[in-house]
């Protein structure tokens, strides 16, 4: 998975000589990397996240209303040095439900919006048939923003 992270970072920042430095996180489903130029100067952050989508066998019940087994998906969020989202990419999505969240056009709603709390129906469009997965992604990105704000403050 780290190779996918590196490829996306190279593509977004258009830099060939970068280093990813793992940042310790208290969150088991998040892997945070500081993105540095080859000389060690900071460039931004990458957050690799394992998130929950639909219930196994369908999206009939939202995940906060029932305990059960959930399908998971992996996505990468790339932030600039100011903690603003530059790019999001769904790296692994195996469910037959909710896969529309992988659309680059839909994911662009998150890009270049400093200080924004994302809310379904307010600044993020719904996707018919993917409500549970969309809500999960929005919630996780909002959590990432809080974590990244503290890391940016340490710079």
Image: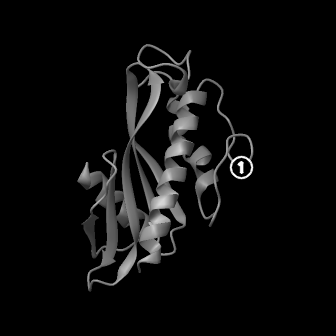
Q: Quadrant of residue 45?
A: bottom left
Nearest the viewer among 84 and 91 is 84
Mark 1: few, some, or many residues within 10 Å (few <14, many ≥20)? few
Q: Residue at x 25, y 54 (%)?
A: 3
Q: Residue at x 59, y 59 (%)?
A: 111
Q: Which residue is mark 1?
A: 123
With 134 as the anchor, is 153 left or right in this view? left
Q: Is residue 110 above or below residue 136?
A: below
The answer, for residue 93, to whether it is visible in the render is: no
List x then y, in percent, for residue 63.
51, 25
List x then y, in percent, for residue 89.
45, 49
List x then y, in percent, for residue 57.
43, 13
Q: Secondary structure at mark 1?
A: loop
Nearest the viewer among 5 and 44 is 44
Q: Is residue 16 above or below residue 30?
A: below
Q: Residue at x 38, y 47 (%)?
A: 49
What coloring was used for the rendering? Answer: one colour
With 136 as the anchor, is 32 left or right in this view? left
Number of numbered discs overlaid on the protein picture: 1
Quadrant in the picture for the C terminus: bottom left
List x then y, in percent, for residue 92.
36, 38
Nearest the viewer among 145 and 112 is 145
Q: Quadrant of residue 18?
A: bottom left
The answer, for residue 64, to whether it is visible in the render is: yes
């Amino acid at each position: 998975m780290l190779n996918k992270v590196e490829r996306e970072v190279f593509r977004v920042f258009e830099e060939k000589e970068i280093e990813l430095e793992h940042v310790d996180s208290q969150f088991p489903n998040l892997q945070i990397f500081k993105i540095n130029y080859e000389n060690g100067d900071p460039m931004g952050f990458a957050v690799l996240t394992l998130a929950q989508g639909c219930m196994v066998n369908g999206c009939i019940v939202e995940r906060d209303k029932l305990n059960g087994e959930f399908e998971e998906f992996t996505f990468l969020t790339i932030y600039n040095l100011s903690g603003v989202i530059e790019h999001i990419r769904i790296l692994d999505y195996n469910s037959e439900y909710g896969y529309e969240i992988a659309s680059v056009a839909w994911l662009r709603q998150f890009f270049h919006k400093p200080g924004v709390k994302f809310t379904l129906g307010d600044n993020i469009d719904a996707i018919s048939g993917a409500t549970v997965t969309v809500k999960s992604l929005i919630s996780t990105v909002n959590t990432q923003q809080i974590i990244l704000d503290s890391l940016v403050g340490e710079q």
